[in-house]
Amino acid sequence: MARRSLAGDATAGAASRVRFAPTSNNLLVSSWDSGLRLYDADEGTLRVSAESEAALLDCCFEDESSAFACGSDGSVRRYDFHSGSQDTVGLHEDVLACIEFSSMTGQVMTGGLDKKIKLWDLKTRNVSPSGTIILDSDVASLSICGVYILAAVARNVYFYDMRNLTTPVNEKDCPLEYQIRCLHASPEWNAYVAGSVDGAVALKHLDRGTDRDLGYSFRCHPKSRNGRSNLVPVNCIAVHPCKKTFVTGDDEGCTIAWDARSKKKLIEGD
């Protein structure tokens, strides 16, 4: 398979998140160097570049022409690719770790080290959050599944209904022994996949309303170098919506595609 590089020094400050656009093959990259970059993945060319005042730890698309990013200064910012403008959607009291957008409700969800999840209603254009969830620990990762927000907090996964944030719809112990680093929910699978700091991954089916929550966990990124075990965190997970496969990526640049049914490794790359 031919390799293709992105122009414009895509990893000038180490990429914190990479996302494909909703319908096109554009690629959104947030970076620790405070830059947000939009690429044409087919051509490998830089289309738009925007600078921020703080390191950007996560990003997501609103649509093909606009996106959001969250920063180490606690800011939530919206970027308009057509006009080149950016504005502040809201603020947290500490570093922001994750951001998601729900096209179903028109809300932005953010979570971070202030132990809060905040929702921002874009229709009101109000910098005050439309909803706030206070938790006992830092929010490591967020994912959206229909009208539900899934939040990774320590080694637990919390389910919240965006229409009623008073209490979790469900709180499940994830079958991982250590803290969850990343989380990806799939409405097509009716399941989520979570990765931990010790190189393990877990898949759990969403069975809201009962405790019959089927799934499994296994160590997906063990490393052995020079006769020594060298476990690295699972930093990111991508789930294929149609095929029963998912991809994990670790701290050292290794990516592995997995068959979700058999837990068999399909392909590995560095």
Image: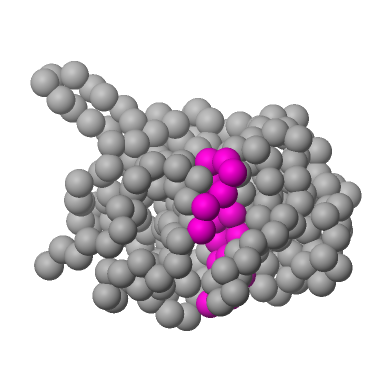
Residue 148 vs residue 263: left or right?
right
Outermost residue toward the bottom? 23
Residue 125 visible to the viewer: yes
Residue at the spot x=27%, y=69% of the render? 44
The spot of residue 90 in percent (x, y) is: 76, 51
Quarter-of-image position of residue 41: bottom left
Q: Quadrant of residue 125?
A: bottom right
The residue lying at 57 percent from left, 69 percent from top is 84
User: Left of 106 or right of it: where is 206?
Assistant: left
Q: Nearer the viewer, residue 211 or 139?
A: 139
Q: Residue at x 35, y 62 (%)?
A: 245
Specify whether 240 is left or right of 207: left
Considering the whole magenta stretch, tell me its main secondary structure. Answer: strand
- Occupied quadrant, residue 199: top left
**Does 64 sit above or below residue 259?**
below
56 in magenta: yes
State the extent of the magenta-drawn residues as a range: 50-69
In the image, residue 164 lies in the stretch drawn in magenta: no
Residue at x 75% of width, y 45% of height: 91
The percent coordinates of residue 120 (x first, y second) are: 78, 58
Split into 4 quadrants, where in the image is the N terminus?
A: bottom left
Total labels: the figure holds 0
Rendered location of residue 164, percent (x, y): 86, 58
Q: How is the image coloured?
A: one colour
Q: Is residue 203 visible?
A: no
Looking at the image, is 198 positioned above or below residue 189?
A: above
Q: In the rendering, at what x and y percent does residue 177 appear?
A: 49, 29
Is the residue 96 above or below the residue 138 in the image?
Answer: below
Q: In the image, 226: left or right of 77? A: left
